Amino acid sequence: MKKFTQRFLRDSKGVTAIEYGLIAGLVVLVIATAVGNIGTDLSTLLGAVATKITNATPAA
């Protein structure tokens, strides 16, 4: 049992997996934030274009 405990305490594979998981989580968070901001900006831009097109069209 002592041998197993010592081997378990020296094993760093779990720590590495947790670090990779945290990095992946941060990357996903950054991507989600960027996509959300781009979506908002794109929506605003397309709304402005639609308004200009509507105002430029002569009423029949």
Image (cartoon, grey):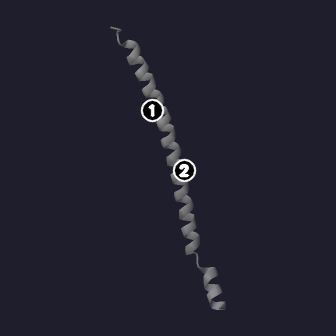
From the viewer's perspective, tell me whether residue 11 is left or right of residue 40: right
Quarter of the image for the C terminus: give it: top left
Q: Where is residue 11 in the image (x, y as percent from the top left)?
A: 58, 79
Q: Badge 2 is on which residue?
A: 29
In this rendered view, identify the residue nearer to me: 42 or 4.
Answer: 42
At horizontal 43% and vertical 19% (from top left) the residue drawn is 51
**Label 2 secondary element:** helix
Quarter of the image for the N terminus: give it: bottom right
First-in-chain label (2 vs 1): 2
Q: On the image, which quarter does residue 3 sit in? A: bottom right
In this rendered view, identify the residue nearer to me: 9 or 28.
Answer: 28
Q: How many labels does the image show?
A: 2
- Numbered mark located on residue 58 in the image: none
At horizontal 54% and vertical 59% (from top left) the residue drawn is 23
- Numbered mark located on residue 42 in the image: 1
**Label 1 secondary element:** helix
From the viewer's perspective, tell me whether residue 57 is left or right of residue 31: left
Report crowding for label 1: few under 14, some 14 to 19, many 20 or more residues within 10 A (C-alpha): few
